[in-house]
Image (cartoon, rainbow, N blue to C red):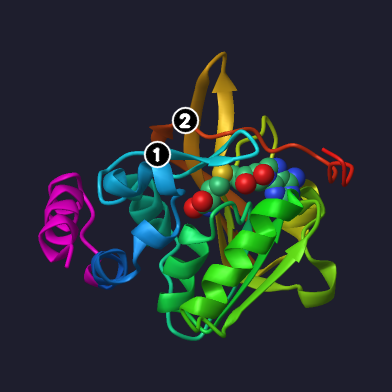
Amino acid sequence: MNAALRIRLVMELRRSGVTDTRVLSAIETIPRNLFVSEPFADQAWDNAALPIGCGQTISQPLVVALMTQALKLTARFKVLEIGTGSGYQTAVLAALTRRVYTLERHRSLLVEAESRFRALRLTNIVAMLGDGTKGWPAQAPFDRILLTASAAELPPALLNQMAEGGILVAPVDVGPERQEVVRVQRTAEGFSTESLFPVRFVPLVPGVPDEAS
Ligand code: SAH
């Protein structure tokens, strides 16, 4: 139905430096229109971030694709995502690897994302309400960790929960109104960090809001 729009998006991502064909095919296959709210449905296949409620946004497809590509996924990994939001990035990860654990601090976003996972029969996702800055100790270590919200410092708990040989990809604050995506690799010797590209993300906020909010 929206095949032409999907192909237009994939072509744009290719032109913008997304080379991993598995990532491109996941973007083409996952119905992003099911992850945006009704007023924005006609923009679902645009390369743009869109509001999803609770003051949050579904990330721009190019950023989802570049961050996913930076993770260097194989089909066997156990991945932790911080910031489920709409669940779109989660679904892209779930299409590419064995199991995805995802944490969200807003219950209403989590509930909506979980119903999308059920509707799409994405059975390799485990989602939970929680503070992502603490990670998911019961399921650690993780082969890959992805943050979809930005902080000045990478939470130490997340670095601790990386497996040896693991990769973490995250936006970090590098100045006023300036963020960049970094990739951290963990080896037997320690951690090494490289910066990849500039981005704009919502902030990583510690704690879980009261149920009333
Ligand atoms: N990956 C999402 C992007 C959502 S925006 C998508 O594709 O739609 C980032 C999300 O991170 C928001 O939903 C926000 O509520 C969540 N978030 C921010 N701080 C968090 C924290 N400490 N723990 C868990 N989730 C957090």
The answer to which of 89 and 14 lies nearer the viewer is: 89
* Residue 147, horizontal then vertical, whole percent: 59, 50
* The C terminus lies in quadrant: top right
Q: Left or right of 54: which side holds 175?
A: left
Residue 149 drawn above or below residue 200: below
Disc 2 secondary structure class: loop
**Whether residue 165 is visible:** no
Report the residue marked by disc 2: 200
Q: Which mark is residue 49?
A: 1
Determine the residue positioned at 42% across, 67% down: 92
Q: Quadrant of residue 80?
A: bottom right
The residues colored magenta run 1-21
Determine the residue positioned at 51% across, 81% down: 122
Disc 1 secondary structure class: loop
**Whether residue 131 is visible:** yes
- Respond yes or no on whether mark 1 lies under 8 Å from ligand 1: no
In the rendered structure, does residue 203 fall within the stretch colored magenta?
Answer: no
